[in-house]
Amino acid sequence: MKRREFFGLSAWSLAALATGCARPPAMQARQMLTLDPKSGATLHNQKVSIPKGNRSTLDSAGHGFLLANGQSVLALDFAGQSCVIPGPDNGRWVRPDLLVTAEKTSSDIYRVCGVHFPDGRILWSQEMGYGQILGFDAQAVYVGHLKGVTCFELDGGKKRWENTEMNELKSWCVLPSSLVLGLGNAGRVCWLDLKNGKLVRSLTTTTTPNRVILVAGDDEYTLTLTRRIALAAFRPDQLKPVWVQPITAYDHQALLLGYANRIALVELHESSVAVDIVTGGTLWSDSLCTHISICQDVALLRRGRGDTGGRMSLVLEARQLRSGKSLWKRELEDIHAVTAVNGENFALLTT
């Protein structure tokens, strides 16, 4: 057995011993490619072995592929080492050697764990009312739950702070110095200090009751999208928006597809739209994409394509982030192929 396959089985083997089940999961061979973002050329190609089945992509922070199927989380780094954590259906890859997973263990218990990579050891565990991982930085992970928001240190899982005044979370984003939250259905946005969880400032984006469903940005500009109302950007020293871009009443399920270099890629107007959050200008738009990865100044778009025989394929298209200029395209028969960012290049996991 190859070394990377051993790591892929280790967590499952431990679970099997605990439950009395000795049968390991069925494995499948996959190809992991490294692609040049400008040309699409394959820079590296290697075979890896992972458990069979289709999984959705989670936030891997550039450490590898992080995939979930509702019953477990699979982490696969770019060197081919892998780890399966049975149980959780959500997680973040916060450091090369550390995952944070989340699992609803009952109707009212939400368990968050720090997991060592690649051996799958549980380093710490915290339980609370049902919630959601909001994000993380180099020191901590931020979790929203029924009683508010709690900050746990990545090393050891110690509770750093808890804010019980924040509830009805509708959107969230971790900025360099603050946690931004969209609350309730009144267009309210709050900024919490990452160090102590205290409220730094708050504002209301609209006089028409509605929820803020999207936030993104940095410490200087924060982008908000208020359902059925408008896109807007705010600066720390201003309560009024720097700019406002009205949207239609039909744009009520918008998603943030990607963010980098003060450009937000947003699902809007039944298309993927690149918005400059400094000026509010639309830089370019394209047909709706299911997922976008950003590397350097290149956005990699994913689309499904069907033929007359009913077969589906996956089309990857790289575009310059600011101009929208198409750089290259690649069509794959594997509709379930996933993408990630490997340093200054794209990574692709496919059959």
Image: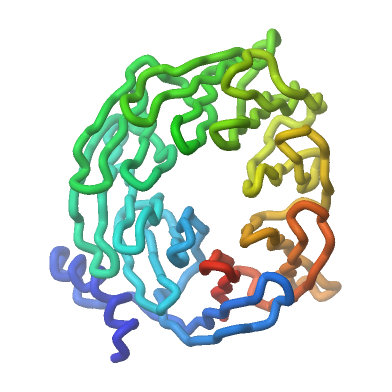
Q: State the count of labels.
A: 0
Q: Residue at x 58, y 14 (%)?
A: 203
Please state, as top left, top right, bottom left or bottom right, where the C terminus lies in the image. Answer: bottom right
Residue 43: x percent and y percent? 60, 83
Residue 315: x percent and y percent? 74, 69
| Residue 256 drawn above or below residue 224 | below
319 or 9: nearer the viewer:
319
313 or 254: nearer the viewer:
254
Quarter where residue 309 is shown = bottom right
Q: Residue at x 55, y 20 (%)?
A: 189
Residue 27: x percent and y percent? 40, 80
Q: Residue at x 69, y 82 (%)?
A: 41
Tell me how the rendering is colored: rainbow
Q: Is residue 259 left or right of residue 183?
A: right
Q: Residue furthest top?
A: 207
Please state, as top left, top right, bottom left or bottom right, where the N terminus lies in the image. Answer: bottom left
| Residue 345 drawn above or below residue 300 | below
291 or 174: nearer the viewer:
174
Residue 307: x percent and y percent? 83, 72
| Residue 67 drawn above or below residue 239 | below
Q: Residue at x 80, y 46 (%)?
A: 271
Quarter where residue 38 is shown = bottom right
